[in-house]
């Protein structure tokens, strides 16, 4: 059964503080303990000199043990709670899933 890599690129609004961003990423990281099927989470700010980020300044990667685990995560109340906190803080987002 393939794992699912769930990537998100975020463009935070300029007025969102570093403390707020740190808080939001902590909330995302805690989802690993709250929602079954998440086997990995990592995220942070853009850190390359390559300059190909198109103004997206943060990102995260979540690995799910299966397609079914990802499908449980998406509507899960804890995911929806964190998503509702993040969305007002961003100007844009890209989410991309693929099988690994």
Image: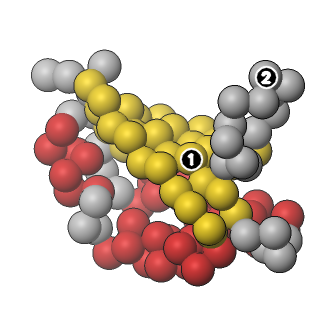
Gap in angstroms between the C-alphas marked 1 and 2: 16 Å
Name the residue that disc number 1 marks.
9
Q: Position of residue 52 (x, y in %)?
A: 69, 30
| Residue position for label 2 | 50
- Between 27 and 98, the one lying in front of the other is 98
The quarter of the displayed image where residue 96 is located: top left
Name the residue: 18% across, 38% down: 67
Residue located 25% across and 67% down the image? 75
Circle 2 sits in a helix, a strand or a loop, which is it?
loop
Q: Position of residue 32 (x, y in %)?
A: 45, 50
**Left or right position of 29 against 31:** right
Q: Is residue 87 left or right of residue 78?
A: right
* Relative depth, front residue between 93 and 75: 93
Q: Is residue 26 above or below residue 39?
A: below
User: Is mark 1 in CB contact (under 8 Å) with mark 2?
Assistant: no
Q: x, y (%) of residue 3?
A: 27, 27
Tell me: residue 27, above or below residue 45: below
Q: Earlier in the sequence, mark 1 or mark 2?
A: 1
Secondary structure beneath disc 1? strand
In the rendered structure, the answer to whether residue 11 lies left or right of residue 73 reads right
Asked if residue 80 shows in the view, the reply is yes
Question: Which numbered marker is on residue 52?
Answer: none
Callout 2 crowding tier (Cα within 10 Å): few <14, some 14–19, many ≥20: few
What residue is shown at x 65% (from left), y 74% (from top)? 89
Quadrant location of the C terminus in the rendered image: top left
Quadrant of the frame with the N terminus: top left
């Amino acid at each position: 059964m393939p794992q699912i890599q769930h990537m998100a690129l975020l463009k935070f609004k300029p007025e969102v503080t570093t403390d707020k961003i740190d808080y939001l990423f902590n909330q995302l990281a805690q989802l690993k303990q709250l929602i079954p099927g998440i086997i990995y989470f990592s995220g942070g700010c853009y850190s390359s000199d390559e300059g190909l980020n198109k103004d997206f300044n943060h990102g995260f990667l979540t690995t799910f043990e299966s397609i079914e685990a990802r499908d449980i995560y998406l509507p899960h109340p804890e995911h929806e709670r964190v998503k509702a906190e993040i969305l007002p803080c961003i100007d844009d987002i890209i989410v991309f899933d693929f099988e690994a």
